[in-house]
Image (spheres, helix red, strand yellow):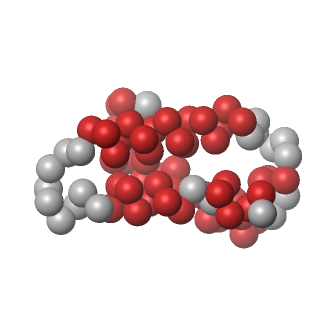
Amino acid sequence: MVWEAARLQKITLLLFQKLPKHISQKSDDLIAKHAVLNWIKQNPFLYGPHYLSPMELGLRVPVFFLVITDLGGEL
């Protein structure tokens, strides 16, 4: 389904896996950054099926928030 991969929930797992270690894992950060920026590039704002459902949007907001707060100025 088009929805599952586009929910970006795997990115959340990637970012949370480093929390207990309290160390930065640059490769995970780069993967998360690339995945989110790639998704945004492939899904222009308000265009396509990913913007039709409020629930689908609601599933992505936490992922975008985590990536932005975790990577800070690196985006």
Say whether residue 12 is left or right of residue 1.
left
Residue under the image location 65 percent in, 38 percent down: 40
Say whether residue 5 is left or right of residue 24.
right
Residue farthest left in this picture = 22
Residue under the image location 64 percent in, 41 percent down: 39
In which quadrant will I find the C terminus? top left
The part of the image, by quadrant, that contains residue 18 is: bottom left
Q: Total marks drawn?
A: 0
Residue 4 placement (x, y as % from top left): 68, 63
The part of the image, by quadrant, that contains residue 22 is: bottom left
Seen in the picture, residue 6 relative to 20 is either above or below; the reply is above
* Residue 36 visible (yes or no): yes
Q: Nearer the viewer, residue 22 or 68?
A: 22
Residue 36 placement (x, y as % from top left): 54, 42
Residue 72 placement (x, y as % from top left): 34, 38
Residue 51 placement (x, y as % from top left): 79, 53
Q: Nearer the viewer, residue 4 or 69?
A: 4
Say whether residue 2 is left or right of residue 64.
right
Residue under the image location 52 percent in, 50 percent down: 64
Residue farthest bottom in this picture = 55
* Residue 71 visible (yes or no): no
Residue farthest front in this picture = 1
The part of the image, by quadrant, that contains residue 59 is: bottom right
